[in-house]
Image: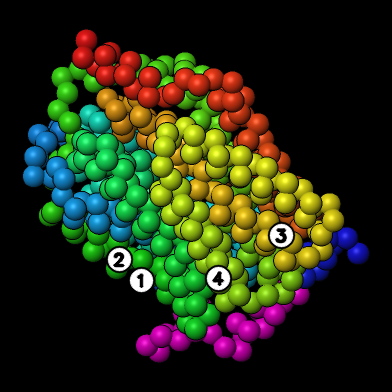
Amino acid sequence: MDDACFLQINSTIGVSSLQLKESQSVGVLHGFQLAQLGQEYGWLCKAVTVTTYTSLAVILLCFGCPEKGPKDPRMVGRSTVTIYLGLVVGLLYFTTDQYLPSMPQMEVELAGSQTLLSGSVQLNIFSKCVIGLIVAPLSDKIGRRPIIVTCTTLLILGSFGCALAPDVGWFLASRILQSLGESLEPVTFAILRDCFPEPQDRLAAVSVVRAFELFGIFLGPVVGGLVASFSHWRVPFFLLTLAWAGLAHYAAFCIHETAVDTKDPPSYKQSFQRVFWDPQLVTLLMTETLVLSTYYAFDSNISYLTEGLYGKGTVTTSWLIGAFALCSAFGMLLVTMSTGQVLVTAKRWMTAFSLGSGLFFVIAAIFFSHYLWAYLGSSFLMGFTLACYLPLGVLFLDPLEDFAGTAASFEVFAQAAPPSIYSALATQGLIHFGQRGLTWFQAGSALLAGAVFWMGFGSTSTLIMEHAEESIEHLAK
């Protein structure tokens, strides 16, 4: 029996067992049967979702965007800004990762399919990146504060809609609402540029925010899976509604304008040309795309692999995803401790990522495609070397300080939108060819990432910092 047939049979068995469990015992909280909330209160999800989309359209069409306020100097250098942005970014990743272990159960309750539930992750990632290409440049013109207040409010409404979704269609509609809110991610890094003009201070602040991001990646599947196993998968979405309400309240009353006051900022076309007419910057974006394609293929398919193919439980999947995040955290800690030129650090870690994890994936696909430990070992090595994207991001943003919001949106799009499409293809590889198909997808993207990077930087000693000096001279003129 090949892997694809085995996966399909196991998926059918898993769905049947889930249906049996649902008929015997459902999570209960304060007397309400949580599994039936979608049927009883699904109308509330529909009302919130439709009202939010309609209100956004009416406000934009009738009232337009607000005027940018002056920069508040009190925001410069404030550690509380770093902590707040860290909580925001960490919770962004927690919001998606927390329901990954519960997707097989959600597939049954929401009358969906493996493709649709796994696709909800990819749809969210792709949507937030496309929207970010509009939102982040808009923050350069109308300011950061209106964006962050609006986006955190949308995250409240989207999380509430997901908690009460009656079927997979309304769940996806609510996830897109969350995507609108999550498009603030590049704006958070633009705020860090505004508040920490010194490179050393900004590096420390970015490191703190990335640390919160890792906590979100680690805690999301662990906490979400544990809460879902002891109650129901809807409960984490209710808790997220409360968490985003607190962050939105803080943004409304404690975050002031941080965007730099500029008389003649570069247009979107000029910003686009400065990035995509530069071969080294394009190389960095392509490399980040391929690196994170390898990660997203793992992230969006691990629960179906472990639970559908190997019959593991939700808690086991949660701990495996958490272990992957710990491997990534350790690798990022080592990258942060690296000394010397950033480009040298990038070369070392890209070699480790491509030749290390890439070759391990190839070996696992050829010789050990029926063993879970082989796939997990290769994935954990990939997680450790995933830290290679940190120096890549530093190199990319160095020469683009005068349009940080727009530049960050380009980078976030490259980091997430194409990888989300690639991971959707990897899902089909898992469905039709089993573990071997998924492993080959990850091997291909890892090896290609190294090839693209070394084609752009292997034969030149020119540092990106030279481009930064040119940008400073251009800005001075």
Q: Earlier in the sequence, mark 4 or mark 2?
A: 2
Q: For the residues carrying marks 3 and 4, which lies nearer the camera in this image?
A: 3
Report the amino acid beneath label 3.
Answer: Tyr
* Image position of 162 with respect to 342: above or below: below
Q: Quadrant of the C terminus?
A: top left
For label 4, count other residues whose C-alpha is less than 10 Å away and answer few (under 14), some (14-19) or many (20+). Answer: many
* Image position of 75 with respect to 275: above or below: below
| Residue farthest to the top, as pictured | 477
* Residues at circles 1 and 2 in contact by the CB criterion of under 8 Å: yes
- Distance Cα–Cα, label 2 vs label 3: 35 Å
Q: For the residues carrying marks 4 and 1, which lies nearer the camera in this image?
A: 4
Provide the residue designation for mark 3.
375
Q: Residue at x 42, y 71 (%)?
A: 236
* x and y percentages locating residue 359 in the rendered image: 73, 46
* Image position of 271 with respect to 59: above or below: above
* Image position of 171 with respect to 242: above or below: above
- Distance Cα–Cα, label 4 vs label 1: 18 Å
Secondary-structure class at tag 4: helix
Q: Quadrant of the N terminus?
A: bottom right
**The disc label shown at residue 243, or none:** 2
**The disc label shown at residue 153, or none:** none
Provide the residue designation for mark 1.
239
Residues drawn in magenta: 12-38
Q: Quadrant of residue 120?
A: bottom right
| Residue farthest to the front, as pictured | 340
* Residues at circles 4 and 1 in contact by the CB criterion of under 8 Å: no
